[in-house]
Image (cartoon, rainbow, N blue to C red):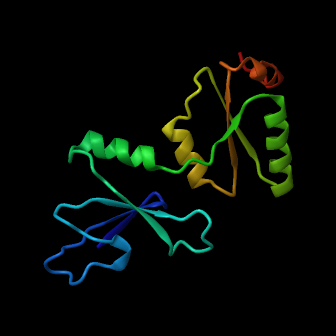
C-alpha cells in the first residue's frame, strides 16, 4: 500500500506477517516497527536503484519530521559572489531555464527552498544569495533588494 505525496515522497506500509517475503530493496528487517528511507541514486538513469537509509531516532512525530526534512534532496545553487552568479546565469541560459533568486540575510537554505528546487528541478534554477556574504552585496543592489 503506497501513497504518493507532492510528487516525490512515497510512504509505504509492509506487513511482515501477512505480505510475504520482504522485498530485496528494503534489506533486512530486524524488528517492528522498522522505518526506512529509500532515496534514488543520483547517478542512476532510472529511479529503480535506491540507497536505503535506516531511521534510528525516536518514534515521535517531531523526530520523524526532522529526519524527513534533513533527508530531503536540495538542488539549490549557492551563490558566493559574482563569479558564482555568472556561472549560474550561464547555466540558466544554456538550458533555457528561468532563474528563481532567493535573497536572504541568512546563510541557511530553507526547507521550502529545498522543496521548490526538487519539485521544479529541470524547469527552474533556484539560487540562494546570502546578504551575510559581502561579495553578494552588488547582486542585491543589481536587483533592487534592500
Residue 138 versus residue 38 in the image, above or below: above
Q: Residue furthest bottom?
A: 20
Q: Give the x, y percent position of residue 46.
A: 58, 74
- Residue 36, picture quadrant: bottom left
Residue 51 versus residue 76 in the image, above or below: below
Q: Residue at x 33, y 70 (%)?
A: 2
Residue 138 versus residue 102 in the image, above or below: above
Q: Residue at x 48, y 60 (%)?
A: 8
Tell me how many marks there are.
0
Q: Residue furthest left?
A: 17
50 vs 58, left or right, is right
Residue 8 versus residue 20 in the image, above or below: above
Q: Nearer the viewer, residue 16 or 131?
A: 16
61 vs 143, left or right, is left
Q: Residue at x 58, y 23 (%)?
A: 106
Q: Quadrant of the N terminus?
A: bottom left
Q: Give the x, y percent position of residue 87.
A: 83, 42
Q: Nearer the viewer, residue 58 or 75?
A: 58
Q: Give the x, y percent position of residue 69.
A: 42, 44
- Residue 129, picture quadrant: top right
Q: Nearer the viewer, residue 129 or 124?
A: 129
Q: Residue at x 32, y 79 (%)?
A: 23
Q: Give the x, y percent position of residue 19.
A: 20, 81
Amino acid at each position: 500500500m503506497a501513497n504518493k505525496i507532492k510528487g516525490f515522497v512515497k510512504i509505504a506500509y509492509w506487513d511482515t506477517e501477512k505480505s510475504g517475503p520482504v522485498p530485496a530493496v528494503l534489506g533486512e528487517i530486524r524488528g517492528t516497527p522498522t522505518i526506512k528511507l529509500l532515496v534514488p541514486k543520483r547517478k542512476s538513469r532510472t529511479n529503480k536503484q535506491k540507497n536505503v537509509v535506516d531511521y534510528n531516532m525516536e518514534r515521535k512525530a517531531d523526530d520523524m519530521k526532522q529526519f524527513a526534512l534533513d533527508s530531503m534532496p536540495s538542488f539549490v545553487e549557492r551563490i558566493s559572489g559574482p563569479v558564482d552568479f555568472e556561472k549560474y546565469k550561464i547555466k540558466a541560459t544554456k538550458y533555457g531555464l528561468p532563474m528563481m533568486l532567493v535573497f536572504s540575510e541568512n546563510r541557511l537554505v530553507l526547507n521550502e527552498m529545498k522543496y521548490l528546487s526538487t519539485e521544479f528541478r529541470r524547469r527552474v534554477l533556484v539560487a540562494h544569495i546570502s546578504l551575510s556574504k559581502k561579495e553578494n552585496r552588488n547582486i542585491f543592489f543589481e536587483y533592487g533588494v534592500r
